[in-house]
Image (cartoon, rainbow, N blue to C red):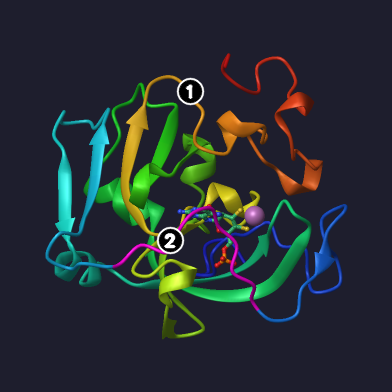
Amino acid sequence: MDGMGQPESRRSGRTQLPPGQRLQRGWPVTHYGPVPKFRPDRWEFRVFGATVDGEKHCWSHEEFSALPYDTVLADLHCVTKFSMLGVEWGGVTTRTIMELAPPAPETTHVMIWAEYGFSSNVRLSDFAVDSALFATHRGGEPLTAEHGFPVRLIVPHLYAWKGPKWVRGVEYMTADRRGFWEERGYHNIGDPWREQRFSYQEEPGEGPEF
Ligand SMILES: Nc1nc2c(c(=O)[nH]1)N[C@H]1C(S)=C(S)[C@@H](COP(=O)(O)O)O[C@H]1N2
Ligand SMILES: [Mo]
């Protein structure tokens, strides 16, 4: 369905799960630490680091809410082995953000920053797929606080820890660096189809030195 307005997603279909995963009923809440309190007056969404113009780009919550809204049908795979298939997410695509705040040509990786300093690194090529989005909604409803309100990242083709909840910023990087879970034993790339769960599985070149 490329070019038909349907986002390209590496979809498993409803009967096929990535290896080692099982289907989850309902929607569990999984994260480290407390659920942050949303304070609209103090909230901003920031793109910084290796931007093409060298500037930092910021959006207030009101401005972010006015950005183009898209939906994506995507699966969610937690490394603890539960998966949800065919979830409809709504929000701002990573491509929209990259158009408004383009990365410099040297950018190779992206660090996603969330509340309390939580972070996750992804390759620019994984971040830039057209099925990746900063979700504000699920199934047409705004996200609840525990699921990441006001914004969480969805990168459907990677394990879900690569999609921080309570996102506050994007850092364009010219070299790779490990995020929160990637520093704590989880795989630097995190492809569920290759079962890239843990950092000891990394092949040479798949991650920076610790
Ligand atoms: N800020 C933040 N985002 C996070 C996490 C976290 O610990 N902190 N955990 C990740 C993990 S491991 C998973 S499986 C998903 C779970 O999303 P859910 O709680 O909405 O199901 O959130 C991801 N986003
Ligand atoms: Mo997870």
Q: Is mark 2 within 8 Å of ligand 1?
A: yes
In primary-sequence order, the first of circles 1 and 2 is 2
Residue at 59% of width from left, 60% of height from top?
A: 8
Which kind of residue does numbered mark 1 sit on?
Asp
Q: Which residue is mark 2?
A: 152
* Residue 63 numbered mark, or none: none
Query: Does dot 1 land on a helix, a strand or a loop?
Result: loop
Q: Is residue 40 shown in magenta?
A: no
Relative to 53, is 111 on the left or the right? right
Between the C-alphas of marks 1 and 2, the distance is 21 Å
Residue 72 placed where, x, y %?
Answer: 52, 70
**Position of 49 relative to 190 (above/below):** above
Using a 10 Å C-alpha cutoff, classify the residue at mark 2 as few (fewer than 14 neighbours), some (14 to 19) or many (20 or more): many
Q: Which residue is mark 1?
A: 176
Confirm whether residue 42 shows in the render.
yes
Bounds of the magenta segment: 27-37
Residue at 53% of width from left, 53% of height from top?
A: 32
Residue 189 placed where, x, y %?
Answer: 63, 35
Residue 185 placed where, x, y %?
Answer: 67, 32
**Position of 13 relative to 163 (above/below):** below
